[in-house]
Amino acid sequence: MTDKSTGASDPNESEAAKSDDAAGVSPSAVAADGDTRVPAGQRKVLFVLLALAAVIYLIDQLTKNWVVANLPYGISQPVLGEFLQFHFVRNPGAAFSLASGSTWIFAILASCVVLFIIWYSARIRSVGWAVFLGLLLGGTVGNLSDRFFREPGFPQGHVVDFISTPWMIPAIYNMADIFIVSSMAIFVMLTFRGIRIDGTREPSKKERAAAEAAETAEEPGRGE
């Protein structure tokens, strides 16, 4: 900084500038490193994740509220014959009415999943991974809110289940369960295709073999 009244340079700033020059660091590089703004690509991915989670949560809660208000408890209501039925039950256990009697344990586990997704989302650069985590987050929060706010009360509220497809599985489930299972299918697909969380793709065996062959072919010329 220069003193406008005397025109003299600040000796401390001069020493700092010399130190930066000696280290090969330019002032513009320092400013760039200090920029804490989120890149546009990352903002897009975070928007996809959070928007998808919000939409899924709304779908789950709206359907559950409709079921509670309109369907009789414990009685099957055919929708598409034996293919699809609505059967309103309150589930104290895990997804698909499994492990009833351990509601508070599942509430803790679901809370941990939600916190992990929120923490991990800052690393996501892939839209595919954002869709996977958005589905998982929306479905998990949907069932978790039932455990927090529905009867018999926090943290042992029972999850509202109502979808029955006896030809496929004997359990009764809800929209949140469907989205959670869908997220697992997407996770398997991403893993199988080798898509990393940063959006890059892991080379296939054929691509790695081709790269190794190219490196081997270039080796004789390296010593020239």
Image (cartoon, helix red, strand yellow):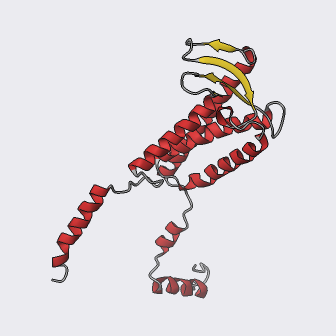
* Front position in the image: 67 or 94: 94
Q: What residue is shown at x 67% (from left), y 19% (from top)?
A: 87
Image location (x, y in percent) of residue 16: 55, 84
Numbered label tally: 0
* Front position in the image: 81 or 219: 81
- Mark yes or no: residue 173 visible: no
In the picture provided, is 212 more to the left or to the right than 178?
A: left
Q: Quadrant of residue 10?
A: bottom right
- Mark yes or no: residue 94 visible: yes
Answer above or below: position of 119 versus 140.
below
* Front position in the image: 224 or 180: 180
Q: What residue is shown at x 57% (from left), y 51% (from top)?
A: 121
Answer above or below: position of 67 versus 50.
above
Answer above or below: position of 62 versus 176.
above
Image location (x, y in percent) of residue 99: 71, 38
Location of the N terminus by quadrant is bottom right
Q: What residue is shown at x 29% (from left), y 61% (from top)?
A: 208
Location of the C terminus by quadrant is bottom left
Answer above or below: position of 6 versus 107.
below
In the picture provided, is 63 more to the left or to the right than 129?
A: right
Q: What residue is shown at x 60% (from left), y 86% (from top)?
A: 12
Image location (x, y in percent) of residue 177: 61, 33
Image location (x, y in percent) of residue 97: 68, 32
